[in-house]
Image: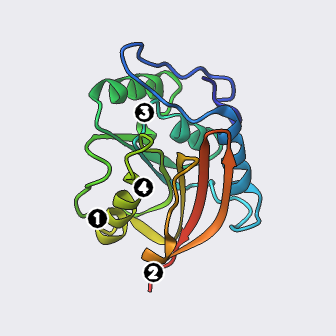
């Protein structure tokens, strides 16, 4: 699994053979970042100095892709300590050690936050309906900047009922193979 673009292009992300990953495919990552940088929904350089939050981080590929393309920093949350150790080791190897923060936690039930993020990646295990629980937690516990962009990957058959979230506005929804990509904007009342 390689970083697609930016200053770390073609760097290979390490993975643990003992872990069961379902990393975001290169095709879906390319589509996601193309949408974000297209200027269609956001300013022309939304990744420049972005504060990113990567939930259910796994390999950290989404954060490393964002950092490679100009994000200021990334907070990666996962409930697997081995994943986080590999992420830290790789960040150190590519010179991003000071730009990442790893937290061992259940990303679907986070506490109140004193820091907000403007780009959020949610990529939970499929078939557990964790996106709804995670979105509810992020909004309730003050994790999102006004106008934050949230990109979610879920199984193709999953539906996200945005009417339950009046602060979220759908920007893009696409299906790629067995995955559904949903991008929303968070707007505070």
Query: Marks 4 and 1, how far apart in space?
Result: 22 Å
Image quadrant in which you'd find residue 9: top right
Q: Residue at x 60, y 23 (%)?
A: 1
Query: Vertical placement of 145 versus 6: above or below?
Result: below
Q: Tag 3: Cα neighbours inside 10 Å, few (<14), some, or many (≥20)?
A: many
Task: Say whether disc 2 or disc 3 marks the residue closer to the N-terminus.
Answer: 3
Task: Say whether disc 3 or disc 1 marks the residue closer to the N-terminus.
Answer: 3
Residue where numbered disc 4 is placed? 131
Foreground tag (1 vs 2): 2
> From where the camera sits, is residue 47 visible?
yes
Q: Tag 4: Cα neighbours inside 10 Å, few (<14), some, or many (≥20)?
A: many
Measured from the top left, where is residue 29 in percent x and y? 65, 40
Foreground tag (3 vs 4): 4
Task: Say whether disc 1 or disc 2 marks the residue closer to the N-terminus.
Answer: 1
Task: Say whether disc 4 or disc 1 marks the residue closer to the N-terminus.
Answer: 1
Dot 1: what SS?
Answer: loop
Q: Residue at x 32, y 49 (%)?
A: 107
Of the numbered discs in the image, which one, if any, rests on residue 58?
A: 3
Measured from the top left, where is residue 111 in percent x and y? 22, 59
Query: Vertical placement of 79 versus 175: above or below?
Result: above
Q: Quadrant of the C terminus?
A: bottom left
Dot 3: what SS?
Answer: loop
Dot 4: what SS?
Answer: helix
Q: Residue at x 36, y 57 (%)?
A: 134
Measured from the top left, where is residue 94 in percent x and y? 53, 25
């Amino acid at each position: 699994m390689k970083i697609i673009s930016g200053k770390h292009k073609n760097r290979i992300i390490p993975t643990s053979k003992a872990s069961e990953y379902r990393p975001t495919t290169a095709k879906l990552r390319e589509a996601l970042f193309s949408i974000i940088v297209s200027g269609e929904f956001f300013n022309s350089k939304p990744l420049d100095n972005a504060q990113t939050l990567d939930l259910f981080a796994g390999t950290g590929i989404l954060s490393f892709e964002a950092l490679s393309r100009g994000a200021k920093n990334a907070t990666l949350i996962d409930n697997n300590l081995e994943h986080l150790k590999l992420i830290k080791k790789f960040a150190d190897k590519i010179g991003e050690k000071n730009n990442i923060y790893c937290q061992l936690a259940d990303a679907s039930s986070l506490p109140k936050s004193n820091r907000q993020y403007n780009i959020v990646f949610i990529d939970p295990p499929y078939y557990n309906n964790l996106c709804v629980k995670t979105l509810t937690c992020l909004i309730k516990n003050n994790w999102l900047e006004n106008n934050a962009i949230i990109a979610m990957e879920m199984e193709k058959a999953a539906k996200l009922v945005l009417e339950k979230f009046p602060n979220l506005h759908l920007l893009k929804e696409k299906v790629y193979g067995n995955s559904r990509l949903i991008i929303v904007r968070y707007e505070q009342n």
